[in-house]
Image (cartoon, rainbow, N blue to C red):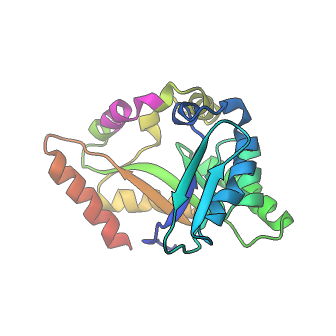
């Protein structure tokens, strides 16, 4: 098991509604990613980069001291998992169970990377995390905070396919030992790193955040 502290990489996400706010069609997300990735990688190797694809969306960025960096793609569908392995340095997931990581994300991204002659991909698993002694309270709080993911079509289909009713059901909650054990199951499934989204539970939110953050620091 390897706990990573270096979360320096560019994440390309195509989740609605942010994606559509850029003027891009969500149903063509894979094509946009194919067009966009080379421009993103260029930004780490040149002083100026025009991040623009065939659609009417573009961003001009100035990098006075560019440095190469890793790029991982939000990979929620089979086509996006193939793109993540074939064109990027790996994949990042959100609201994805251990079973999906083991049976779909890891093998599909890894195969695509191998077929493209790329290095072994990074599999960054995003998870809501809360260290709290009352599990039911923590799950209920997660359902409140992450309710939107139960309504967005892509995530709703993903949750349904995994047999998960509410977003809070996938949250990692419990005391310090229980949270460590649960996170370990994702590493066992093939995750190379965890991207923890800490959320609070209980009456003292500041203390709740601090307890969760301390737990994660102790795992590094």
* Residue at the (70%, 45%) spot, across then down: 53
Residue 20 percent across, percent down from the top left: 58, 31
Q: Quadrant of residue 168?
A: top left
The quadrant of the image that shows the C terminus is bottom left
Asked if residue 9 lies in the magenta stretch, the reply is no
Q: Which of 103 and 126 is in front in this view?
A: 126
Q: Nearer the viewer, residue 191 or 151?
A: 151
Q: Which residue lies furthest to the right in this view?
A: 115
Q: Is residue 16 above or below residue 61?
A: above
How many tags in the picture? Answer: 0
* Residue at the (86%, 64%) spot, across then down: 115
Q: Is residue 78 visible?
A: no
Residue 65 percent across, percent down from the top left: 50, 75
Q: What stretch is highlighted in magenta?
A: 139-148
Q: Can residue 53 be seen in this view?
A: yes
Q: Which of 172 and 31 is in front in this view?
A: 31
Asked if residue 144 lies in the magenta stretch, the reply is yes
Q: Main secondary structure of the magenta part?
A: helix
Q: Which of 133 and 74 is in front in this view?
A: 74
* Residue at the (43%, 61%) spot, across then down: 181
* Residue at the (75%, 50%) spot, across then down: 34
The answer to whether 12 appears left or right of 106 in the picture is left
Q: Residue furthest left?
A: 204
Q: In this view, does 131 lie above or below 167?
A: below
Residue 200 percent across, percent down from the top left: 26, 45
Q: Quadrant of residue 26?
A: top right
Residue 33 percent across, percent down from the top left: 70, 47
Q: Is residue 15 above or below residue 73?
A: above
């Amino acid at each position: 098991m390897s706990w990573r502290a270096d979360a320096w990489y560019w994440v390309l996400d195509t989740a609605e509604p942010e994606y559509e706010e850029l003027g891009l069609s969500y149903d063509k997300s894979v094509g946009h990613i194919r067009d966009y990735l080379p421009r993103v990688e260029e930004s780490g190797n040149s002083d100026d980069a025009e991040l623009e694809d065939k659609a009417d969306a573009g961003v001009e960025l100035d990098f006075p001291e560019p440095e190469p960096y890793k790029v991982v793609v939000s990979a929620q569908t089979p086509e996006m998992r193939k793109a993540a392995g074939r064109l990027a340095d790996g994949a990042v997931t959100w609201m994805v169970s251990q079973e999906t990581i083991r049976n779909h994300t890891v093998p599909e991204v890894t195969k695509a990377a191998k077929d493209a002659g790329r290095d072994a991909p990074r599999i960054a698993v995003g998870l809501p995390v809360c260290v709290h002694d009352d599990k039911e309270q923590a799950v209920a709080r997660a359902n409140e905070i992450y309710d939107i993911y139960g309504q967005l079509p892509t995530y709703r289909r993903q949750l349904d396919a995994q047999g998960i009713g509410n977003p809070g059901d996938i949250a990692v909650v419990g005391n310090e030992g229980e949270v460590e054990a649960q996170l370990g199951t994702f590493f066992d499934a093939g995750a190379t790193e965890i991207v923890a989204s800490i959320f609070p539970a209980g009456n003292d939110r500041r203390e709740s955040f601090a307890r969760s953050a301390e737990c994660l620091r102790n795992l590094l």
